[in-house]
Image (spheres, rainbow, N blue to C red):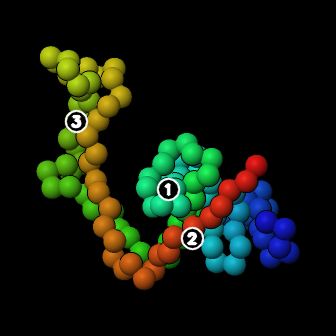
Amino acid sequence: MDDKSWNDVNTYQDKKNIYNGEIGKWGNIRFVGATDVYKETVAGEYTGDDDNSVHFATLLGRDAYGVVELEGQGQGKEIVCVKKGQPSPSRSEIECDVMFTTKILNATFGVNIACAVSD
């Protein structure tokens, strides 16, 4: 972020096409912050809160992945969310089935960078 070619999101001319959580861009790479990143130990095991874990920054190029609508989940259908263990649907609950999935289109258009993190 100290590089002269870093563009902070606050300096963007186009304010409409900003990703949720975007913090800036460097070259043609747009950086989006996340609070729940993938982490694992040096031994390669997934970890949630280990301070000594390795964090992964994912860079995705255009057309690296796509979003696929699941069959039978087209527009116009009512989505009913049900809390597990409840006998009847409740529209006040927030747990829902996912109505889409992602598909890797070209794995060479993406890369994970392993990072150490410090305070």
Label located before the other in sequence (3 or 2): 3
In percent of width and height, residue 30 lies at 63, 68
Label located before the other in sequence (3 or 1): 1
Determine contact: label 3, label 2, CB under 8 Å.
Answer: no
Foreground tag (2 vs 1): 1
For the N terminus, the image quarter is bottom right
Locate residue 76 relative to residue 67 in the image: left or right: left
Instruction: Give SS at disc 2.
Output: strand
In percent of width and height, residue 40 lies at 50, 56
The residue that label 3 is drawn on is 78
**Type of amino acid under label 2:** Ile
Instruction: Give SS at disc 3.
Output: loop
Foreground tag (3 vs 2): 2
The residue that label 1 is drawn on is 40
Locate residue 111 relative to residue 100 in the image: left or right: right
Answer whether residue 16 is visible to the viewer in this image: no
Label located before the other in sequence (2 or 1): 1
Q: Residue at x 28, y 45 (%)?
A: 98
Determine contact: label 2, label 1, CB under 8 Å.
Answer: no
Residue 78, by quadrant, is top left
Q: Residue at x 55, y 42 (%)?
A: 49
Answer whether residue 8 is visible to the viewer in this image: yes
Which mark is drawn over residue 107?
none
52 or 99, nearer to the observer = 52
Q: Image height check: is 98 above or below 70?
A: above
Mark 2: few, some, or many residues within 10 Å (few <14, many ≥20)?
few
Instruction: Give SS at disc 1.
Output: strand
The residue that label 2 is drawn on is 113
Whole-Å distance between the Cαs marked 2 and 1?
Answer: 13 Å
83 or 58, nearer to the observer = 58
In percent of width and height, residue 90 lies at 25, 20
91 or 16, nearer to the observer = 91
